[in-house]
Amino acid sequence: MRPELFGPGRRATTVGILLLISMIAFEAMGVGTAMPAVVADLGSVSSYAWPFVAFTAASVVGTVLGGRWCDQRGPRGTLVTSPMLFGAGLLVAGTAPSMAQLLVGRVLQGLGAGAVAVAVYVLIALVYSERARPAVFALMSSAWVLPALVGPPVAGVVTERLSWHWVFLGIVPFVVVAVVLVLPAVRDLPAGRPARTGAHGRGIVAAALAAAAAVAALSWAGQHPTGLPAAVVAVVALALLVPALRRLLPAGSFRARRGIAAVVASRGLLSGAFFTVNAYLPLMLTSTHGWSLSAAGIPLIVGALGWSSAAAWQGRHPDLSRPTLLRVGFAFVTVGIAGLLAVAPSWGVAWLSLPFWVVAGVGMGLGFSSLSFLLLARSAEAGPGRVGSDSAAAQLTDQLSQATLVGVGGALLATTTSPAVALPLLIAGLLVLAVVGTGIAGRTNPL
């Protein structure tokens, strides 16, 4: 397997893919650490959420349009232009003297990041054999581990010793190197022929913009969960989102119909359940149990290590059934989330978060890598010229499920007496989603 990934004909492509994923991961981990300093310099606390909302909404548009472009023209153009767009966003944000310019940079970053992720999947489908793909997805998972471990502390030191501007600007060299390494593989790819638009393609731009607006609105409503305005915004957002999703997702996704629709639905359930807990776990440990911020980050680190280890293991076993591994992964995530019900209340045992979140991380390493493999396999079975749009649909469910469920958590915190009351309710709801995912995992097998 190693020669196919790192042999003379593949080494630059594999390393380039890892750098593309790593640049997005470092940006995601570092910017969150630096954002308090950014907002203090350029704006006020009331504008804290907008750099994140701008990135998320733009990434929805980049994801959808990048997938469509890959299906129509092949991934060659997207693999060159989207990292350059991401890099331009880093430069604009890194030199920003005002909040307005920062938001422009975040929009460019979101557009580039969304399109990059889709184009990488299409590249993997074209370049690597089906047997090698589990190992490729294992490497992609490992590309998130180093940024998760060193990104926040490095960003903190850079912000304190130099300036928050260098948190953005310091990633630009990674973008340049990644593009240079991917170019040899890109040159050998066919440019692609324009695909027939068909019913699914009509109105794709309008649907992408509607979904982006809905994500931004839901994020705002989650930040302001009380009062009539937030309720009205949430209702309008859902009214925009539902018809947009009918256009953007494979038919039957809401029912988890067998095949690619079940893969897309499973991706939303798995990501939504895990990453929402990941977002609120430090708050649970600090506010309810009095842990320091540094100590509260330890469960996230061990969870990331569990994810990477499990992803590496599945990569060494390409002959295992991926629907079965997905079900096992969902079961592990279910156990990990259920264990936090013994942590979240005020009477809970805080240290149990460590072993249970390792279990959840192992589940993600098995489940997420299996979903990535199944996505390419089922998309190929559904018909030619579908990998880009189906990869975009899976990534879109990631973004929407996380935005919606994190917003639900914010609403619970705002409407209950304390995190010790709100977070057990949130954990219980996410546990239901994980159980549902375990039940539908078998539907990813079309037989």
Image (spheres, rainbow, N blue to C red):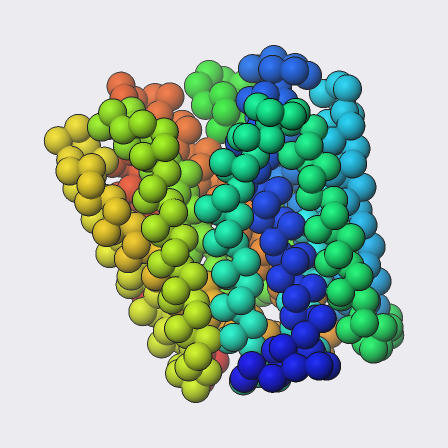
Identify which residue, 1 or 409, lies in the foreground.
Answer: 1
Is 402 above or below relative to 436? above
Q: Is residue 166 visible?
A: yes
Residue at the location (32% across, 44% down)? 299
Residue ranking furthest to the top: 44
Quadrant in which the N terminus is drawn:
bottom right
Nearest to the observer: residue 29 or residue 235: 29
Which residue is most to the front? Answer: 161
Quadrant of the rendered image containing residue 121: bottom right
Q: Position of residue 50 (x, y in %)?
A: 63, 26
Q: Is residue 412 left or right of residue 221?
A: left
Does 76 sit left or right of 368 as displayed?
Answer: right
Q: Compared with residue 212, is residue 274 higher up or lower down, i.e. above or below?
A: below
Taking the spot 49% from the left edge, 17% from the top edge, the residue there is: 228
Q: Is residue 232 visible?
A: no
| Residue at point 76%, 66% (across, down) | 182
Taking depth in this image into account, of 352 and 271 the one nearest to the observer is 352
Task: Tell me the quadrant of the picture where the C terminus can be found.
Answer: bottom left
Establish if 77 lies above or below 3.
above
Residue at image position (43%, 67%) is: 311
In-image side of 230 versus 244 (left or right): left
Judge from the rendering whether residue 274 lies leftward or rightward of residue 158; answer left or right: left
The quarter holding residue 330 reads bottom left
Estimate the x, y position of residue 318 in percent, counting from the top left: 46, 83
| Residue 34: % across, % down | 57, 28
Q: Position of residue 393 (x, y in %)?
A: 61, 59
